[in-house]
Image: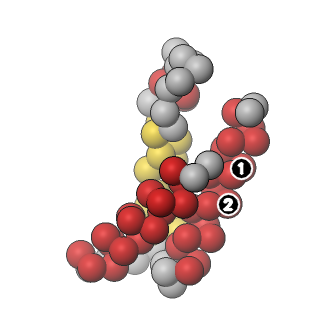
Amino acid sequence: MHDEVVLKKIKRSVLETAKENKVEIYQIILFGSRVRGDYREDSDWDILVITKEKLDRDKFWKLYTSMKRKLASL
C-alpha cells in the first residue's frame, strides 16, 4: 500500500475513533523514520495525537485502547 493511502487511513481511523469517544483532535503528527525517510518496508508508523482538551486517565485509556485496536487492523 502506498504511503499516502496509509496516511489517509490512519487519519480517518484516528478521527473516527476520537468522534466515537467524544474527543476533539487538535493535531495528528507523524514522526520517526517515516518522516526522516530512512524507514524500511516493515517499519511502523509513529504518530502523536494531540487532543483539544486534557483527558482524565479513564478517558485517555479508553481512547488509547480504541485507537490502538482500530489502527492495528489497518
In this orientation, which residue lies closer to the viewer: 69 or 5?
Answer: 69
In this orientation, which residue lies closer to the viewer: 8 or 36?
Answer: 8
What quarter of the picture does the N terminus occupy? top right
- The amino acid type of the residue labelled 1 equals Lys
* Residue 51 in the image, given as x and y percentages of width and height: 44, 68
Q: Is residue 12 above or below residue 72?
A: below
Q: Which residue is mark 2?
A: 12
- The amino acid type of the residue labelled 2 equals Arg
- Residue 38, can we see it? yes
* Residue 2 in the image, given as x and y percentages of width and height: 75, 31
The residue positioned farthest toward the left in the image shown: 57
Q: Secondary structure at mark 2?
A: helix
Residue at point 71%, 49% (across, down): 8
Task: Give the quarter of the image for residue 11.
Answer: bottom right
C-alpha gap between disc 1 and disc 2: 6 Å
Residue at point 57%, 52% (across, down): 73
Residue at point 53%, 73% (across, down): 18
Q: Which residue is mark 1?
A: 8
- Residue 54, can we see it? no
Circles 1, 2 touching at the beta carbon (< 8 Å): yes
